[in-house]
Amino acid sequence: MLRKKIIGLLLLATGWTACTQNFDEINTDPNRLEKIDPSTLMTPTLYDLANFNYNRAHSFTHHLMQFMVTTSTTGGVHRYADLQNAGNSTWNTYYLQLTNIKEMYELAVGAESKNYQAVALTLRAWVYANLTDCFGDVPMTEACRGDEGILTPKFDTQQKVYEQVLSDLETANSLFDESESLSSTDLLYDGDVRKWRKFANSLHMRSLLRLSKRSEMNSLAKLAEMIGNPVKYPVFENNADGALLPISGISPYDSPISRLEDFRSNKAMASFFVNTLVELNDPRLPIFMDEATKNDGSQEKIGYKGYPSGFAATERFDYNASNINATLGTAPMKVLFMTYAEVEFIKAEMAWRVFQDYGYISLRPLQIAVNLDNALCKQNIRINVPSVFTVGVSTSPEIMGNAAERLFGQTPEAIAELAKDIIFGQLRLVIASMMIEEINADRETFLRAVEANVAEELKKLGLELLNVNITDITDESGYIKAIGQRAAAGAINKAKIDVAEETRKGSIGAAEAQKLERIAVSKAEAEV
């Protein structure tokens, strides 16, 4: 009996082992990824952001912009009837995607993929720029760190957020390696790194323009630098470069509008938008909307007309306003992150902003007296260089942005003081690099060196060096005076020698003439 029990236990144990030795393999879901890479997160993140933004624009932003109105008799964003929770979906969606972007970046770092790091930084910058534009101060440095136990992250100032946005985009531009491609699963650019880089820099330009009235951010100068250096900062050059996400309408990439009937119901075009396009005879009118109709049951078309934003809920109209074209909510479609047209508008805005600012800066040349004393030359001899510099605000397109950024609102006196500080510094540097004999004897070389150094630094202020006049150069030790006295004494001695030589030559010549005269006289007397 004991033997049977032992055998039974052994059989039971053997059977148990046999059932569990492949436990991990049996319980592995073949439809789930065991390991993910950055590309796995990129496409769903792009789609979810595009999907949300499209719906949010349609239901909220368009109404604030007087693009559309609500025909409902209650509420309506166009009536500014907003609740305190109006921004909840934006907040929640963006921070959810920021968590995915954070993981994408960390995976890219682990995989040593610079391109995916750059993509993650670009998307993070795009999201945070939108977040801070919507809410001002937002969590950033402690955001998306719930796994670290940070469940109530601190709020960062809007300035700090934008500083990080600009830094991320600058880093992204330097990380992109155009010799390699991204995964073919890239829904936005199909792996084209060059276009991703253009997107990052175009977004950088958008952010800089939004900060253009904050002088502490120095954004206009940076924007001018980017526009002036397309090799280092390539941006959108045509419509094909634009960040337009294609939505096929084939699952899982369905249209953002899940029910097309909701796309148009209780909505109409706003008269502000409609009238603007009508006045411009804009060819996009039939693309954006259908025609209005009479409200008499005839449905007779009467052209393009909208309802005024903010109209009273009780107000009635004798026409049915134009409504948004249903095709705009139907896939296949493209959802906009950023367009080529926006880049061109940024450039135009930059040019206009500089032109406006620049117009208030006096173009009258400034004469700046620079009395430099005790400047050390290469021999450690202290010299005095009194001079007058003539400068003016540059009209060169390459540096006019600097003038608008740094000199706008400054008085001529203040501008002169800024220039004087630069001149003093550069003049000392030039003097320190030359021997006193060079400075004293070869004024032309000295002037060229001064002009080159000073002019380059003045450009950073938006100023142009027009003229330099050095009146005299002296030193307290009397070295230059001694050089002059020595040169004068040498000249005097040489002159004396020359005079003596000419006198000697004259005496010899006179004697020779007298000799010839005597010979001639003697000869004549002999013939007589």
Image (spheres, helix red, strand yellow):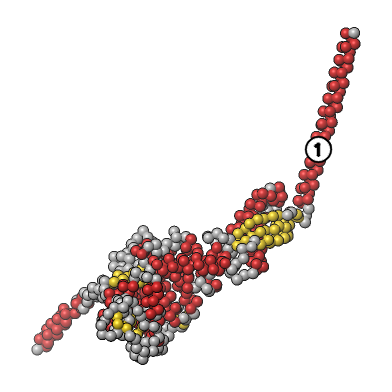
Relative to the observer, which residue lies in front, 253 or 108? Answer: 253
Relative to the observer, which residue lies in front, 210 or 154? Answer: 210
Specify the quadrant of the image occupied by residue 261.
bottom left
**Residue lying at 16% horizontally and 78% vertically, measured from the top left:** 18
Q: Is residue 369 left or right of residue 339?
A: right
**Residue lying at 62% horizontally and 70% vertically, measured from the top left:** 410
Element type at mark 1:
helix
| Picture layout, residue 507 above or below residue 227 | above
Relative to the observer, which residue lies in front, 241 or 59? Answer: 59
**Residue lying at 75% horizontally and 54% vertically, measured from the top left:** 474
Q: Circle 1 is placed at which residue position? A: 495
Specify the quadrant of the image occupied by residue 281.
bottom left
- Mark 1 surroundings within 10 Å by alpha-carbon count, few (fewer than 14), some (14 through 19), many (20 or more): few
| Picture layout, residue 120 above or below residue 482 | below
Whether residue 48 is visible, yes or no, is no
Specify the quadrant that holds the C terminus. Answer: top right
Give the percent coordinates (x, y) of residue 497: 81, 35
Kind of residue sitting beneath label 1: Ala
Give the percent coordinates (x, y) of residue 174: 43, 63
Q: Is residue 94 left or right of residue 136?
A: left
Give the percent coordinates (x, y) of residue 130: 41, 77
